[in-house]
Image (cartoon, helix red, strand yellow):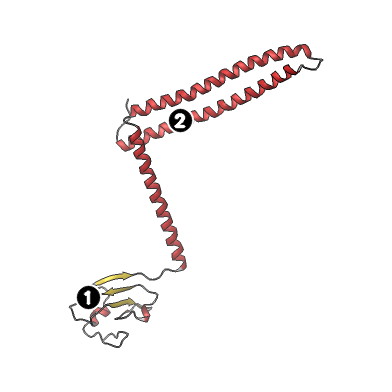
Amino acid sequence: MVRVPNGRSCRLAAAFCGLAGLSLLPLGAFAAGTLYCCHDASGKQVCGDILPQACYGRAYREIGESGRTLRNVEAPLTAEQRVQRAAEEEKRKQEEAARREQQRKDQALLNTYGSERDIEAMRKRAEEDVLKSIKSAETKVAETRTLRKKYENEAEFYKKKKLPVEIQKGLADADVEIKAQETLIAAKQKELETVRQKYDEDLRRYLELTKTSPAR
């Protein structure tokens, strides 16, 4: 016979109170209302029509009049478990945000390109724009070097004299311009590589999403 906290006996429910796996009893097997059951520190099942003290801080079940489990209540988390669960929840949120962002990017990709040829056409235009900028800068460098050579030739006549201001300024301006254009060329070359990587990735993802093979 199992005693509940208010002192009432569970004579007909004794088998239930002693067996954790049994979840269904005849109506009237215990007093009307909810029954609370858990396993105490020794592993024995304890039940009562109010939560037994032995169940405090432990997982327990709420059981209805029909003998069916109404709900399972988890044991309170330890501080370490709370930290771990918070970390897991944050990770889940980040993964969900990443999944939604990838879905957004995929839809934008499919809205942008109708075929593999569209990707290649846009790649070509983007590359041509960057190459045009590089070519223009290279031309500017060549022109400035030619101009600088002119100032260098003029400076030959002043080896033992102070250079005129206009020649000094011409040489200095040419050096500044050449450096600026060479910096621009280096930046555009990096941009060209970025463009190529972008369209390579767009093509790879497009083929993955559409399950097609690259055109030959």
Q: Position of residue 117 (x, y in %)?
A: 34, 26
Quarter of the figure with the N terminus: bottom left
Please identify the residue farthest to the bottom as the structure is shown: 7
* Residue identifier under label 2: 195
Q: Nearer the viewer, residue 12 or 178?
A: 178
Q: Which residue is mark 1?
A: 67
**Residue sitting at 63 percent across and 17 percent down?**
145
Q: Position of residue 120 (x, y in %)?
A: 38, 26
Query: In the rendered structure, which amino acid carries the disc numbered 1?
Result: Gly
Q: Nearer the viewer, residue 118 or 23?
A: 118
Cα distance in 3D space between marks 1 and 2: 67 Å
- Residue 171 x, y percent position in the rendering: 70, 19
Q: Position of residue 48 (x, y in %)?
A: 30, 81
Query: Measuring 45% from the left and 25% from the top, which residue is drawn there?
Result: 127
Of all residues, the one furthest to the right in this rendering is 160
Residue 179, compared with residue 90, is above or below; it is above
Residue neighbourhood size for the residue with mark 1, other residues' Cα within 10 Å, grouped as few (<14), some (14–19), many (≥20): many
Q: Please, what is the three-letter code of the amino acid marked with disc 2?
A: Val
The residue that appears at 55% across and 29% down in the rendered structure is 187
Q: Secondary structure at mark 2?
A: helix
| Mark 2: few/some/many CA within 10 Å (<14, 14-19, 20+) | some
